[in-house]
Every structure is written in structure tokens, then in C-alpha cells.
Amino acid sequence: MALPSLTLLESFATTARLGSFAAAGRRLGVSASAVGKAIQRLEEEMELALFRRTTRQLELTEAGRHLLTGLAPALDMLEEVVSEARDRTERIEGPVVLTVPLVGYHLVNARLKDFLARYPGVRLDIRFADTMVDLIQEGVDLGIRNGPLRDSSLKHRRFGSYRHGLFAAPGYLAAHGTPTLETLEAHDRITFRFSETGRLQPWLARDGRVLDLSAPRLVTTAIEGARTAAVAGMGIAWLPDFILAEDLARGRLARVLEEEVDETGEFFLVWPAARALPRRLRLLIDHLVTPGA
């Protein structure tokens, strides 16, 4: 039996990864109906049902899951070989669309400056947002997210770690005293609210327990707003350390309850799995994840 064409296999793998003909079509640059016809032809050639079709979603059959398990690494390897061949002649130029959290300039600006200096033909379109951006739907090449990551349509590499803790201005502490876990409830507190869900960001003890506290004095949907309020002496704020280097160095903020209250997390670079990466994007990924690059 002759092997199915690469086009049919790529249509299948892309659909399986992204979950719909429409999403696969956007990624492959064809219509959803063209993807559907390719899947139908592949199923006919293989004499197997690869998807269960419902009104709401596509689900892989057992045969489809088995095919994807073996096919996906092979397609990834083929993509890498083709990319390496292109690297020999491809000029490092063109656009890269990057989505970054609103406070992400603390993470990337210096590194991006170095990258642009090294590759003057690359153009960056940086979109700052705290909402969860659909990279495929929005045509975004690369994003920064904090874990855990659950989207199987995305590939990722670890970008860095961070710590959350409690911070206050020296003036506030001089006026109100340094808190303990027992007295924290009585202090003015500044809390971040997630704009998408309306949920308040929890404050965590070092052992992972959520601190049981009453409503905070000040709520903001911008982490920078919480930081500046803390610097202004308006209360104690739960903040990530990567935005505080200058404030701590200049004595504008001090950490409190460091032994009792702490949370660690990780940032990841993410990009659509079903996409051949141009060299400029692979170089940017390598540059961002490599210390001292």
C-alpha cells in the first residue's frame, strides 16, 4: 500500500493538535472545507476512521490517537530538517509578533534591545495584554505565559522564574509597624484583581496555604498600580519580584514576612505547534531563553 501524501498527513496532524478544521485551515493557509476533504481522503486511503465528528467538536478515535503519536515526532523532525536547509540561504529579516503581559517589559526589553541590535532586519510587533491571547486566532508568533501550561496546540520553552511576596514602603512600616501573620489582617492591603475572571489574587503562605484575610483596602486590575500604591505608602502589596529591582535598590520598598509568605512560579515562551518556524523566530527564542545571549 502506498503511503498517504505529506499534505494529507500534515492536515491530519494539524487538525488533531488544534481541534478543528477551521483552526487547522488558518494554520495551513487553506479553507476549513479543504482540510475536511483532506481528512476524508486520508481516512478513505487508510480505510480507517481517524476522528469522531460531533456537532461541537472533533475527537480522535483510537486509530487516530495511535497515528498521531507516531506521526507528530516524524513531522517535527521533518520540519527541523527543512528549517535547517532553509537556514543556509534564508536572510534573518522580517516581522515577529510577540504578546507579553502588561508588566512584561521588565522581562524582555533589555533582551529585545540586544536582539534587534544583532539582527537589524527583524521587526517586532509587541502586544502587551493581561488577557489570554489565542496565538493562532490572532496570528501571534510568540507569547510569554506563566505555568502550568495546558494547551496542547502550543510548544514551549522555559523562560525564567519569579517569586511573589509582600512589600511595603518604609514610611508605611514606620507609621503602622512591621506586620506578623497575626497582625496582617489589621493592615491596609493592596491586592490585584484578574480582569478576565474578576478573582482577587490569593496571598499564599510558604507552605501553599491561602491566607484567610478580609477584603483588602485597595484593589487594582494593574500590577503596576499595586506597585506604585505600595511605593506611595498606601499599604502592603503582594507583588512579583521581577518588577521591583529598582524600588528595592533605592529603598522605596522593603519585603516583609519573607520567611512566612512566598510563592514561586515560572514563565514560558509559547508558540503554535503546527507551524514551521522561520529562522528569525527560532533565533529570538534561543536568545530569550539563553542567559547572557
Image (cartoon, rainbow, N blue to C red):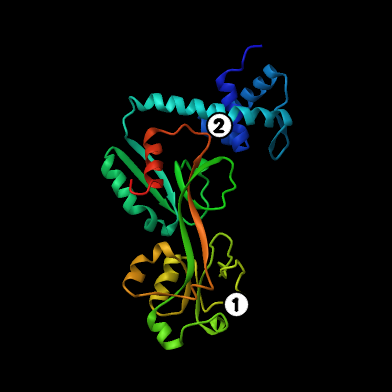
Please indicate whether residue 169 sits to the left or right of residue 60 in the image.
left
37 shown above or below 20: above
Nearer to us: label 1 or label 2? 1
Please indicate whether residue 263 sits to the left or right of residue 242 in the image.
right
Q: Secondary structure at mark 2?
A: helix
275 shown above or below 161: above
What residue do we see at 55% from left, 31% from top?
25
- At label 2, counting other C-alpha atoms closer than 10 Å, the crowd grade (few under 14, some 14-19, many 20 or more) is many
Q: Position of residue 228 (x, y in %)?
A: 39, 72
103 shown above or below 62: below
Is residue 98 something one can see in this rendering? yes
Report the residue marked by disc 2. Answer: 25
- At label 1, counting other C-alpha atoms closer than 10 Å, the crowd grade (few under 14, some 14-19, many 20 or more) is few
Q: Amino acid at mark 1?
A: Leu
Which quadrant of the rendered structure holds the N terminus?
top right
Please indicate whether residue 4 sits to the left or right of residue 229 in the image.
right
Please indicate whether residue 187 sits to the left or right of residue 251 in the image.
right
What residue do we see at 56% from left, 82% from top?
185
Q: Amino acid at mark 2?
A: Gly
Q: Position of residue 36 (x, y in %)?
A: 63, 27
Is residue 32 something one can see in this rendering? no
Disc number for residue 213: 1
